[in-house]
Amino acid sequence: MKKIIALAVSGLTLILTSQNAVAQCQLYQNIKGYTPTSHTLKLTQFDWLAFDQGKVLATGIKGTTNPYQHCQPIDGHQQFMLPGLIDAHGHIAGLGFEMLSVNLRGIASEALAVDAVKNFATKNPASQWIKGGGWNQVLWQNKHFPHRDSLDKSGIKKPILLERVDGHAVWVNSQALALAGINKETPDPQGGKIERDENGEATGVLIDNAMEFVRSKIPPILAAEQEIALDKAFAHLLSLGIVNVHDAGVDEKVINSYIERNKTDRLPIRIYAMLDGSSQKLTQWLDRGIISDHKDFLSIRSVKLYADGALGSRGAALLAPYSDDIQNTGLLRTPTSDLDTLVHHILSKGFQVNVHAIGDKANRLVLDAFEKAYKTVNAKSLRNRIEHAQVVSLKDISRFKSLNIIASMQPVHATSDKNMAEDRLGKERLKGAYAWYKFLQQGTIIASGSDFPVELANVFHGLHAAITRQDHTNQPKGGWLADEKMTPAQALRSFTLDAAYAAHQEKTLGSLETGKWADFVLINQDVIHGKMEDIWKTQVFETWVSGEKRYTKN
């Protein structure tokens, strides 16, 4: 007997069925489908899909012999079908907690951000801390970092912590600074920075590793709160057609939740979890070995490390100073010697290594670390990854291919960053920035993601950015750094089959080929041959995982 749970989420319906539920042979027909395949870089088109026992039997074109006419028919009403979408870099718990906290995404000024915080505090009087995120000073008229004073003047008598949109800086009030013991004499930590005024006083903005001064004072998250956040995130992801997420850096509590949920068939999406490489439990986790699941709902065989910070907060590590801050070359969150040691240790345990690197210096140091480790550890086959690979020296791009490194990139970062990237980098360094075409041309695999909740968790925004290199107002004309565009086929592949490859899952996931899991989505428009400028507006009608409908739009 099937277990079915229906959840109403913002006017949408999410259908969760037990992973053990087995549907009879079904034939989805009257559709317009696209799928990448393992034997060609071209997309295969189809008009019907047959599946049984949760797996694909076949796809085909109308007018040809269809041996599955006996299967239970489903009319697709000429909707468009794609393989289930894979986000190769997201933060599931972070997304869920964002949905439970102050959302400052897109807010146009510091004053308006404070108003939003005050409104949230009024509606949540029981909160011990006021937490949230999404602010981006680049969108504000003065483009300056915010200050603790504006939060102090809000009248809120609680500690406040607000993450920058990239997750690499926080804005806090004086109460939070006091709890953390931050004063004039507090030194910057390794890989972090305390922003200060002309008198040496902390302004309330803490960058990268300095964030931990305050974060460490936040009371532990209750298990019930975490589960609510995860459920909200799962529901939201399924409503967007996302069936698989590479969760980039999970802590012990989230790992344990995933393992327990998987044992009891309560993971509604597939998760490729990257262990938090900064955890004291890392060696223990590595010694436990790879965790896999014959139903492909949970895989733990990789570790996430950090080399540097982010471009927006000037924490990305650069080979030369920032063009708009000539005394600053960014931050190395992990010292080079420690990075080398960690990479070698993790690879020697047979785990894939995925390193956050945004600046050209960080990317070079990570490539160096892999090159050094390969001399003594046979680990090229682990499909190691650089997460973001955002600004790469032209001299280093070819090393991705020679070292068999996957470029795990987020197309929306390019269109989000286009208004400030040249200010930070200058024109010359942009030649190696967001360089999708250069990577693809040399045969490097690109696994695309969104980095949610840094960006919105919407693959169609990513497809649009990858294909057009424009924002949602179709600017700039012709696309920003247009020579680096992906074709529609390349972009779809990067969010499906190539993302599956980056997780060692291409034999069972990522495309609608015979024998693979029947993960697919029904959408309202043609994202391959339709209007490219409208891709970001795509609506998802249905999301299926292992031949079971997990979401339907009301």
Image: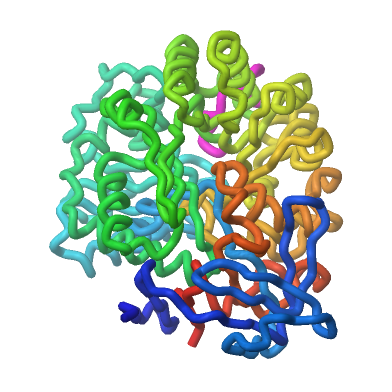
Q: Per the image, is 157 magenta?
A: no
Residue 475, horizontal then vertical, whole percent: 77, 59
> Is 324 above or below relative to 188?
below
Q: Taken as a whole, is the magenta stretch helix, strand or loop?
A: loop
Q: Per the image, is 317 magenta?
A: yes
Image quadrant in which the N terminus is located: bottom left
Residue 268, horizontal then vertical, whole percent: 40, 65
Q: Is residue 72 left or right of residue 548?
A: right
Q: Is residue 124 left or right of residue 13?
A: left
Instruction: Report the residue at 52% width, 48% height from top.
Output: 451
Magenta segment, which residues? 312-322
The answer to whether residue 116 of the structure is visible from this angle is no
Between 331 and 76, the one lying in front of the other is 76
Residue 276, horizontal then vertical, whole percent: 37, 34
Instruction: Report the residue at 75% width, 81% height from top.
Output: 66
Between 37 and 50, the one lying in front of the other is 50
